[in-house]
């Protein structure tokens, strides 16, 4: 029987040659992407959120404590924390504050990320060319260009997670792994959580996989204990530092009370609508949002998000090296948890690309781990099909890198910074509400005050007063800016789309009445805002008013003023005694009402003036002898508030 002849294959020397070429090209692509991102970062200024982080480093470097000053001092703002802030403070202390020094720590983390990704994938058994290609693909992903530096904490957080996975993978590949590797892995996971609290979402499943898979059966208890001790060490140390910096157990407890409330709010865990219908609607909405952010159609995006999990689950059923199995399972679990949280639980108002960016980068690494092997096998073939949406994602990221040049916008900001530095030393600069112009504050070295926290008399008494406006205030905080423009007389000194500086000539003591006829009542559940001044927009059936406010009502034959108001417990600290509300109307009312403690009050006050034949404006002034304190928390309500009103009305 004659044997079937085989067609001659490529010479044996060709395969190593092709591998060498592929490796050289992949490493060149990784170096080129790293250099491009570094060059872009050096030419850019920090972002709004990034500058808020860096203002903490500025404060720490200047000896003012761990926090930032926006009118009040906000200690330990809950954004990116110590592992980013401490080295940034050191850089500021040594080199001063500039565009380059503001980007230095972010750049170092970006370089570390470019090294850690191929190092981890090599430990998982990938060839050099594929590991380097995956790292280059991560750097080219949508979002990495914007959030890879610029003061953000997502890439620093990922660096610590990757380092923890690398330590665990090394332990998994060791016949008798040293306990110190488990302690190191736990320590690095703990530092990742310390960098950003949101790291808990990928760290908990990934850390559990590492602790379970890397620990040998005979030494599992000892290894897991070392992992847990390593994880707890940086968190416990930081809490001791926080307790010392805040000064008391009570302040520490208050900080955590506010922080846990913000975590619950921003994570979406407080959402009551966790039923299938609302969840599916949110899934559809968030998929469409993400599709627009990354630039590929929803079907392709859904395939890219779902199919790697199926392929990885199939691959994990087959025998594999312990390190390979550990890395793949940790990447799978961390991406599933983060993507699932972002699509199903994260509030739609916070469905930002940077909150899912860590999952997108880890997913890219997971896709790379699925590619080795024979492409005729279903899991590998499935992974190869994923290259279609993956290439679409990379195309979007590269277009952003090519098309968005920050130089023009940054030049406008630098002009504003130069102007701020040239103004008199006793100048007072104001932001409004949340919008504190952190980039201008950081680079100019000027402290920014909150216009909402100052009385009109105090503002008008200043000899040199200025309002700062940046792009986020124009784009997102337009209603806050409009409110300031309504009550203040402003003269532009510099007016560009990215940054503006206005001289404040004066602030009117009374806000002008809104357009429309006067009525004899204001109901916060119905009316958007009252005639008069000192009122904030109503929400949830209540409206905050400043400690001194007034409202215009139409008075005809009514004989009394009725007020339903809420006075919060923060107005009554220990040993403060009762508060006093002075209610007055020219010629008709002059009463001081004692408010003994917190609660909702129904006040009925008689009018002493004779009734009018036809409705006439009655200007009612409300003056409380206290103001709500500002919780020193980043997302706290920083407005100058006195109490809340549900209804104020004139009645027979």
Image (tube, rainbow, N blue to C red):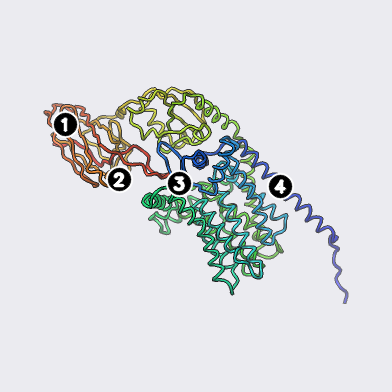
Q: Secondary structure at mark 2?
A: helix
From the image, state whether disc 3 or disc 4 is nearer to you. Answer: 3
Q: Secondary structure at mark 3?
A: loop
Counting residues from the N terminus, which is met first, the one under dot 1 or under dot 4? 4
In the rendered image, residue 453, in percent from the top left (x then y), is placed at: 36, 35
Residue 292 seen anywhere in this rendered image of the structure: no
Give the number of the disc on residue 589. 1
- Per the image, label 4 sits on a secondary structure element best described as helix
Tally the marks: 4
Tell which tag, 1 or 3, sits nearer the viewer: 3
Direction from residue 480 to residue 196 in the image, left or right: right
Q: Which residue is mark 4?
A: 29
Q: Residues within 10 Å of mark 1 (few under 14, many from 20)?
A: some
Which residue position holds label 2?
570
Most distant residue in the bottom direction: 1
| For the residues bearing labels 3 and 2, Cβ distance under 8 angstroms | no
Residue depicted at x 22% and y 36%: 521
């Amino acid at each position: 029987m004659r044997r079937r002849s085989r067609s001659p294959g490529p010479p044996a020397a060709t395969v190593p040659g092709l591998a060498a070429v592929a490796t050289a090209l992949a490493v060149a692509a990784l170096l080129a992407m790293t250099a491009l991102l570094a060059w872009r970062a050096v030419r850019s200024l920090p972002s709004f959120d990034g500058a808020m982080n860096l203002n903490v480093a500025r404060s720490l470097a200047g000896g003012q404590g761990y926090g930032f000053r926006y009118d009040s001092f906000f200690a330990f703002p809950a954004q990116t924390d110590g592992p980013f802030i401490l080295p940034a403070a050191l850089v500021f202390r040594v080199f001063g504050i500039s565009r380059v020094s503001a980007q230095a720590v972010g750049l170092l983390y970006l370089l570390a990320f470019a090294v850690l990704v191929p190092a981890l994938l090599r430990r998982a058994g990938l060839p050099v060319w594929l590991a380097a290609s995956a790292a280059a693909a991560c750097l080219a992903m949508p979002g990495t260009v914007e959030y890879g530096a610029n003061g953000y904490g997502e890439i620093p957080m990922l660096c610590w997670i990757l380092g923890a996975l690398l330590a665990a993978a090394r332990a998994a590949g060791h016949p008798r792994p040293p306990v110190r590797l488990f302690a190191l892995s736990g320590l690095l996971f703990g530092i990742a959580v310390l960098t950003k609290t949101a790291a808990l979402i990928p760290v908990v499943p990934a850390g559990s996989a590492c602790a379970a898979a890397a620990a040998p059966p005979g030494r599992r208890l000892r290894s897991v204990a070392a992992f847990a001790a390593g994880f707890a060490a940086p968190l416990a140390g930081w809490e001791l530092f926080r307790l010392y910096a805040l000064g008391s157990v009570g302040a520490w407890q208050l900080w955590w009370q506010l922080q846990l409330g913000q975590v619950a709010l921003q994570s979406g865990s407080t959402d009551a609508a966790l039923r299938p219908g609302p969840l599916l609607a949110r899934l559809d909405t968030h998929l469409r949002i993400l599709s627009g952010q990354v630039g590929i159609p929803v079907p392709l995006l859904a395939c890219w998000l779902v199919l790697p999990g199926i392929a990885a689950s199939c691959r994990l059923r087959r025998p594999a090296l312990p390190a390979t199995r550990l890395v793949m399972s940790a990447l799978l679990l961390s991406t599933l948890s983060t993507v699932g949280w972002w699509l199903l639980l994260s509030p739609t108002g916070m469905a930002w690309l940077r909150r899912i960016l860590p999952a997108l980068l880890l997913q890219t690494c997971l896709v790379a781990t699925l590619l080795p092997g024979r492409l005729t096998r279903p899991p590998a073939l499935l992974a190869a099909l994923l290259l279609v949406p993956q290439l679409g994602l990379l195309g979007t990221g590269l277009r952003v890198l090519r098309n968005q040049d920050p130089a023009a916008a940054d030049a406008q900001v630098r002009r504003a910074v130069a102007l701020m530095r040239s103004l008199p030393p006793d100048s007072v600069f104001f932001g409004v509400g949340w919008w504190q112009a952190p980039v201008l504050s950081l680079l100019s070295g000027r402290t920014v005050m909150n216009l909402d926290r100052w009385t009109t008399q105090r503002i008008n008494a200043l000899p040199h007063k200025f309002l700062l406006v940046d792009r986020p205030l124009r784009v997102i905080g337009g209603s806050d800016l409009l409110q300031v423009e309504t009550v203040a007389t402003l003269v532009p000194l510099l007016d560009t789309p990215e940054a503006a500086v206005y001289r404040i000539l004066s602030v009117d003591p009374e806000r002008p009445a809104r357009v429309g006829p006067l009525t004899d009542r204001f109901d916060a559940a119905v009316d958007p805002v009252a005639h008069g001044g000192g009122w904030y927009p109503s929400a949830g059936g209540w409206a905050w008013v400043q400690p001194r406010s007034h409202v215009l009502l139409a008075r005809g034959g009514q004989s009394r003023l009725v007020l339903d108001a809420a006075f919060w417990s923060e107005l009554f600290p220990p040993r403060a005694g009762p508060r006093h509300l002075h209610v007055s109307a020219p010629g008709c009312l002059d009463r001081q009402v004692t408010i003994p403690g917190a609660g909702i009050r129904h006040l009925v006050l008689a009018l002493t003036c004779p009734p009018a034949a036809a409705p006439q404006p009655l200007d009612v002034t409300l003056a409380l002898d206290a103001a709500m304190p500002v919780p020193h928390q980043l997302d706290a309500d920083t407005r100058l508030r006195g109490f809340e009103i549900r209804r104020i009305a004139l009645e027979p």
